[in-house]
Amino acid sequence: MHDTYLNQNIYDAILDLCRKHTIKKVDKLVITVHTDSHVSEKSLHDFFNDKHSQIVGDWTKITVLRKQIEKLTAVIENISGE
């Protein structure tokens, strides 16, 4: 359940970053989450797909790194696109 909120927060942050930097299509995304988090490459792809997002799709390479950071947080390490 908590990861649902984290997925939503990641989604919102990515949309905001894309608007600010005029990115229409994300090619690569690297995110760090806590080692116990259930957030994964697949869950993020699914979340964006469920939201009918045109920014992240099958073309997007998502990498989820796991480190001992604060629980229920995520760090967007890298985002690139066109």
Image: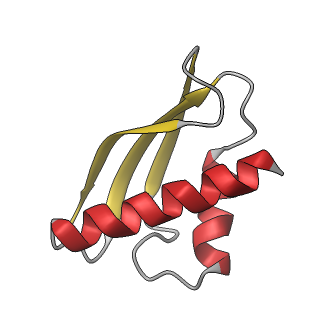
Snapshot quadrant of residue 27:
bottom left
Colouring rule applied to residues = secondary structure
**Which corner quadrant holds the C terminus?**
bottom left
Rendering coords of residue 59 (x, y %): 44, 67
28, 9: nearer the viewer: 9
In the image, residue 80 sits, relative to residue 32, either above or below, namely below
Q: Residue at x 51, y 38 (%)?
A: 74
Rendering coords of residue 68 (x, y %): 58, 14
Q: Residue at x 16, y 73 (%)?
A: 22
Q: Residue furthest top?
A: 68
Rendering coords of residue 81 (x, y %): 24, 62
Relative placement, left or right, of 41 versus 31 is right
Relative placement, left or right, of 60 versus 45 is left
Q: Residue furthest right?
A: 1
Rendering coords of residue 18 (x, y %): 27, 67
Q: Residue furthest left?
A: 21
Q: Residue at x 51, y 54 (%)?
A: 10
Number of numbered discs overlaid on the protein picture: 0
